[in-house]
Image (cartoon, rainbow, N blue to C red):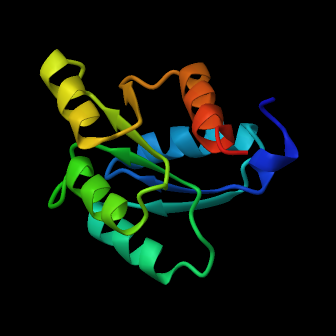
Amino acid sequence: MMNTPALQDKRVLIVDDDEPTRSLVRRVLKRMKIANLQEAAGAEQAIACLNESSEDIDLVICDWNMPGMSGIELFDRVHALRPELPFLMLTGRGDATSVIAAKKAGIPAYIVKPIFPQELKTKVSFLLMKDA
């Protein structure tokens, strides 16, 4: 299932102010044969990317804690424009309060750092293929 043609056609936006995290996510997605990747170092850049993209993004993978606008705030903005767009939150926040806040906000998937490639693959596959 990991290398199905449907995944190869997907477009993913990776949003994280930490380049090594973006690099790890990028490598995992490329191993999944997802080649159409866009990256943003922060929420404002992500919004610009979403507004300027001639192709619709199929999934946003976003860090929670970033300078300026947080991942939760970015989710709220994106969700207001495209409520159906899958969103995967990455964070170092593993406490129950943060997990509950993410669920209450409507975030469908959540990974607590450190990121394990197999967990990322599983969640990305689920989010991208659930409507296929």
Residue 91, placed above or below residue 55: above
Q: Image quadrant of residue 36?
A: bottom right
Can residue 66 be seen from the camera position used here? no
| x 63%, y 43%: residue | 128
**Quarter occupied by the N terminus:** top right
Q: Could you say where residue 39 lies in the image, as x and y percent from the top left?
A: 49, 61
Q: Along the horizontal axis of the image, is 28 left or right of 3?
A: left
Q: Image quadrant of residue 115?
A: top left
**Quarter occupied by the C terminus:** top right
Farthest residue in the right direction? 5
Can residue 63 be seen from the camera position used here? yes
| x 54%, y 78%: residue | 53
| x 64%, y 38%: residue | 130
Number of numbered discs overlaid on the protein picture: 0
Q: Image quadrant of residue 27?
A: top right
Q: Could you say where residue 17 lies in the image, as x and y percent from the top left?
A: 31, 52
Q: Along the horizontal axis of the image, is 35 left or right of 18?
A: right
Residue 86, placed above or below residue 102: below
Q: Could you say where residue 21 lies in the image, as x and y percent from the top left?
A: 43, 40
Q: Along the horizontal axis of the image, is 6 left or right of 64?
A: right
Residue 124, placed above or below residue 68: above
Q: Could you say where residue 105 lies in the image, as x and y percent from the top left?
A: 24, 42
